[in-house]
Image (spheres, rainbow, N blue to C red):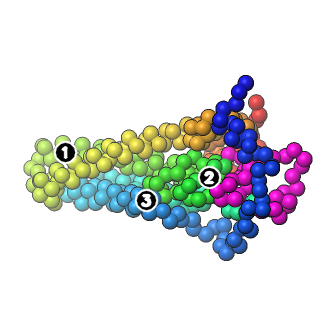
Amino acid sequence: MKSSPANRSRDIERQAGYLCPEHCAPPPPRSHSPHDMWFIRDGCGIVCGVITWMLVFYAEFVVVFVMLLPAKNVAYSIINGALFNGLAFLALASHFRAMCTDPGAVPKGNATKEFIESLQLKPGQVVYKCPKCCSIKPDRAHHCSVCKRCIRKMDHHCPWVNNCVGENNQKYFVLFTMYIALISLHALMMVALHFVFCFEEDWAKCSSFSPPATVILLILLCFEGLLFLIFTSVMFGTQVHSICNDETGIEQLKKEERRWAKRSKWMNMKVVFGHPFSLSWLSPFARPDHGKANLYQYVV
């Protein structure tokens, strides 16, 4: 059977003769802790991140000041206000963690002669070497041209979180898409109820703003909520599907041969969100504790 061009390129990359360690300078000394904040200085990503936060704040403004505060039912305002603001806070916290968490970057410039010798490779054993960042790549790592690093289990680079989605921050990205979808759905439901209330009552009494301003603000929120609901719901579904099948977006796109152990779908979820299952799966503040998750894998 003939191999595809992608497979031929991958075979060449795995050959030790192509490592060329003499072309790699020693990596710069690490002056920071692994727990330091990670941030990509990309103009497009920073703008997209700021826009994301501004859109959430706009939704907060319309929900609180246009719909909830003028409402006559105090219980309705308190319950919906607490629910919407709580979900919005979790969405922004998830976005911050997805943006400022190292997605699984491979140490840059470690493909030096000294480091390769320290690996004590056995005869015939092959390793990856990235020619762009001069790093020894583990399996399932791919180079990101925006982050300028090789990322372990890289799914894709998302400009909306100004970061790659990889091994260490995929949980936060999934939570971000889920909470944005939830607040979008909640906002659309409240807009529908508010329109019904305003049609039944006097428009001047259903909002502290003028009727034309109220209608414009609600229509813009409706458009924003519908757009984000569709987009984030699709992203959430594709991410959960990828996690359950243990195959990243890049691996699906390139149709890469599966060389890793197969696990159950539930165990794949635990690998990303933490082991064992708990409410911390829903928290952007809880770092995934993998525990013994990898011990449950099986090979076919």
Mark 1 or mark 3: whose residue is earlier in sequence: 3
Residue 115 shown in magenta: yes
Q: Report if residue 49 is visible in the image.
A: no
Quadrant showing the N terminus: top right
Label 2 and label 1: CA atoms lie apart by 49 Å
Mark positioned earlier in the residue sequence (2 or 1): 2
Q: Quadrant of the C terminus?
A: top right
Specify start and end residues of the magenta stretch as a single range: 112-140
CA gap, disc 3 and disc 2: 19 Å
Residue at 52%, 48% in the rendered image? 174
- Report which residue position mark 3 lands on: 44
Give coordinates of residue 89: x percent, y percent: 42, 59
| Front residue (pair 237, 30) | 30
User: In this image, 69 relative to 160: left or right?
Assistant: left
Classify residue 223 as left or right of residue 284: left
**Mark 2 residue element:** strand
Would you identify the image quadrant in which residue 185 lies? top left
For the residue pair 127 and 276, the one nearer the viewer reads as: 127
Q: Amino acid at mark 1?
A: Phe
Residue 195 disc label = 1
- In this figure, which residue is indicated by the disc labeled 2? 143
Label 2 Cα crowd, 10 Å radius (few <14 / some 14-19 / many 20+): many
